[in-house]
Image: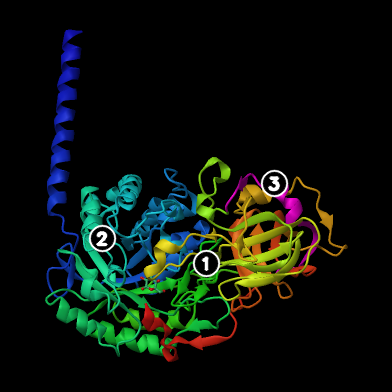
Amino acid sequence: MLMISSSYSRGFITISCIVIFLFYVIHFFSLFTEGLSANATHFTLEGVPFRILGGSIHYFRVPRAHWRDRLLKLKACGLNTLTTYVPWNLHEPERGVYVFHEELDLEAYVRLADELGLWVILRPGPYICAEWDLGGLPSWLLQDKQMKLRTTYSGFTTAINSYFDKLMPKIVPLQFKRGGPVIALQVENEYGSYAKDDQYMSFIKEALLSQGISELLLTSDNREGLKCGGVDGVLQAVNLQKLSYGDVQHLAELQPQKPLLVMEYWSGWFDVWGEPHHVFDAQEMISTVRELLDRGVSINFYMFHGGTSFGFMNGAIDFGTYKPQTSSYDYDAPLTESGDYTVKYHLLRNLLSTYNNEPLLDPPSVQSRRAYEPVVVTHYISLWQSLQCVETRIRADDPLNMENLPANGINGQFYGYTLYETDIYTGGELNSRNHVRDRALVFIDRELIGVLDYRTQKIRIPHIKGEMTLGLLVENCGRVNYGPGLDNQRKGLVGDITLNDVPLKKFTMYCLEMKPSYINRLESLKWVSVGKKPSYPAFFRGRLVVDEPTDTFVKLPNWSKGVVFVNGRNLGRHWSVGPQKGLYLPGPWLRSGDNQIVVFEEFKADETIHLSENPEYGKIIDVSRHPFCTLM
Ligand code: GLA
């Protein structure tokens, strides 16, 4: 007995010694494993010269079931690195509530890239710009009236620290030195164009380091931002579309004896509602890329595949005029919104094949799409009836902005619409005093009388008898994602509105964030057959029967403005002003059999919802002949 137990304990000691020995050997080698390094005029990886040939694909803009297809297409194009932003507003939708599953499973996305033999550069912000609501910052931050975003204001830095405490432990083990594919991380994003606090970039850098980030750090800026976008000890990279402005030369002078990296080579551009669809000439892109490659520059395509800003996630620009972006983020990139190859893809693959030593993978076969039979709209329910399903209605003397409405037991509504109602006793001039963010349908006794927005701030209310209800259905069309105005992105009614110069009081407010749970709850109501003249706004319902779920585009040619939901999921906004005239509906979000399509429509519905094989992005404008993109 004694002998057996002592031989057991000897065995145990030996195994423990081996484990401890191995641990130290691995740790010792990890100290000397050389990841991406920028100590010369070219990058090295594991000590060997390396050129970053990257492409941006945002996991949160692509249905998870399509990740593999898109990443394989990136690899088959001759790229070696995947880059992605990390959207804080989705990962922490409410303060202290974290989401890292389904389309938000960042670890799975990075591991997939690793499995496919791609390196990864992460851009965890926390501000990401990206044509994304508030540049990816959670709008609950704006509940603090003193908030100073992208500064070392303690309310902001404390929130970042809590978020990084949850995010970074997921990223740290995926770093190159730990055997993972993450070779570099970006510190913030284009801070040189904001630059409100000269301590801020060091704070972010230190936050990353203290969390255990040990790979190469870099910053990226446009030409103007390069001056003050950097931070000590961190490589600077530039963002551009054309070489004519001498941006690469400028970077080389600013940072001699360092590798040159175009972190965002803009393959196209984004769209805003009411203006043409931006494209960028494929030949021009290729000749610029060829020149960059010939000059030994590393490059990342922003975007390689744009995808979709599903739901209410689009951002907006405001250079004097507020302009919300579309739900499509096609970007005229080498892969289209639905993952199709384009001329750019093929030209780029030809070019990159000459920069790869190994033959490129065959591009994966094209994914099919279906033009399903039109869906007949059978029933509708008016917005007014739907209010029974609204979880939160709040009464207060003064109108509250969205972020400060105590919705769903948590403080704040962040996206969608809010209905404000109050009783009035006289007609006259209704003045928004520019407090509508961003657009309001105005009702008297629930009959539409007009629209208020940034341009139209006054409306005449006809003479009324007795007491009537004034209603404002205010739509948050998307928070600005770029520029100095980030702190002013509260939505809903952000101050008093007046009737004949007297501020209105005693509001009832209904939060209409239109989450899947709300759309599903509508089912319990008595929907009305569309035979009768519907009252607007309203939710319209149809049934799409599917044999094999396949990608398609939802089109609403005779409709006006609203939001489309499929099986409760918010696909994005539809608006007849275009340019986008179809919403991408990913096949994996459909099920075999019955699927429910609900369209929220503000003004004018049709009897049918069309499902088309191809998108429609509207009239085009070439950005090479349009100065707009020099603004970023
Ligand atoms: C900048 C930002 C990106 C994006 C592009 C325009 O470069 O860094 O996030 O907004 O502009 O598409």
Q: Earlier in the sequence, mark 2 or mark 1?
A: 2
Q: Residue furthest front?
A: 501
Foreground disc of the pair 2, 1: 1
Q: Residues within 10 Å of mark 3 (few under 14, many from 20)?
A: some
Foreground disc of the pair 1, 3: 3
Residue 434 x/y as whole percent: 54, 68
Q: Earlier in the sequence, mark 1 or mark 3?
A: 1
The residue that label 3 is drawn on is 389
Could you say which quadrant of the image residue 530 lies in? bottom right
State the SS at label 1: loop
Q: Which residues are magenta?
A: 369-398
On the question of residue 553 being in view, the answer is no
Residue 418 x/y as whole percent: 61, 56
Q: Residue furthest top?
A: 1
State the SS at label 3: helix
Q: Quadrant of the N terminus?
A: top left
Q: For this view, does 254 lie left or right of residue 280?
A: left
Front one among 137 and 591? 137
Front one among 237 and 65? 237
Q: For this view, does 187 lie left or right of residue 314?
A: left
The residue that label 2 is drawn on is 183
Q: Amino acid at mark 1?
A: Thr
Front one among 295 and 563? 563
The residue that label 1 is drawn on is 308
Residue 54 x/y as whole percent: 33, 70
Ligand 1: does it lie within 8 Å of the C-beta at label 2?
no
> For the image shown, how many numbered marks are present on the structure?
3
Q: Earlier in the sequence, mark 2 or mark 3?
A: 2
